Image (spheres, rainbow, N blue to C red):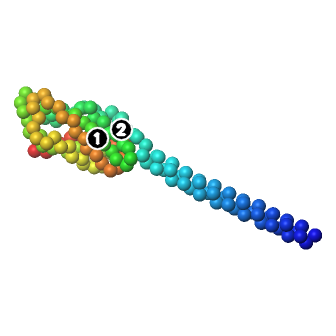
Amino acid sequence: MEMMKENKKKIIIGVIVIIIVIAVILIIGFLLKGKETKKDEESRYKSNTNSEFIKDQKIGDFEFTNTSLNYKDGNSVLRVSVTNTSSQELNLQEFKIHVYDSEHNEIVTLTGFIGDKLQAGETKYIESSYADDLTNAESIEYEIVE
């Protein structure tokens, strides 16, 4: 009789240990999955499609077109085409890109490097990056640096 009671105790303890081990495995698995989900969300590809943000703009003899802003892996990358619309060669080493939120507060100023001169009608493609998500920005303004 005492042996049966002792066997029952061993079985009950064994079942409790198995339940605890399974619970710990499930909790660890859930926590790791939550971290993976967060990482996937951070690395998701997003684009800024706001019409005010991507609209073509002309500043003096320079036209800024084909603007795109994409966010992935913690970085926003702004791409824009810059064309010299004049009939002569022009110097344009760099320009500033002011990025604004919905209340026209400046979020960041990026720099676009042309490098030197643009021939009449020549287009150069510029890329500028920022280590944060700018896909909710509302507008941008270009400033020629002379």
Q: Is residue 28 left or right of residue 67?
A: right
Compare residues 145 and 114 and report the one nearer the observer: 114
Question: Residue drawn 51% across and 48% down?
Answer: 37
Residue marked by disc 1: 78
Q: Residues within 10 Å of mark 2 (few under 14, many from 20)?
A: many
Disc 1 versus disc 2: distance between alpha carbons? 10 Å
On the question of residue 23 being in view, the answer is: yes
| Farthest right residue in view | 1
Residue marked by disc 2: 48
Compare residues 29 and 131 and report the one nearer the observer: 29
The quarter of the picture where the C terminus appears is top left
Give x and y (percent) for residue 2: 91, 72
Q: Is residue 8 above or below residue 62?
A: below
Question: Residue drawn 40% across and 40% down?
Answer: 46
Displayed quadrant of residue 138: top left
Helix, strand, or loop for circle 2? Answer: loop
Kind of residue at badge 2? Asn
On the question of residue 144 being in view, the answer is: no
Kind of residue at badge 1? Leu
The quarter of the picture where the N terminus appears is bottom right
Q: Is residue 16 left or right of residue 67?
A: right
Question: Residue drawn 37% across and 38% down?
Answer: 47
Which is in the foreground here, disc 1 or disc 2? 1
Decide which of tag 1 and tag 2 comes sooner along the chain: 2
Give x and y (percent) for residue 30: 59, 53
Give x and y (percent) for residue 23: 67, 58
Q: Is residue 114 above or below residue 9?
A: above
Q: Is residue 86 left or right of residue 111?
A: left
Q: Residues within 10 Å of mark 1 (few under 14, many from 20)?
A: many
Compare residues 143 and 110 and report the one nearer the observer: 110
Give x and y (percent) for residue 89: 7, 33
Displayed quadrant of residue 14: bottom right
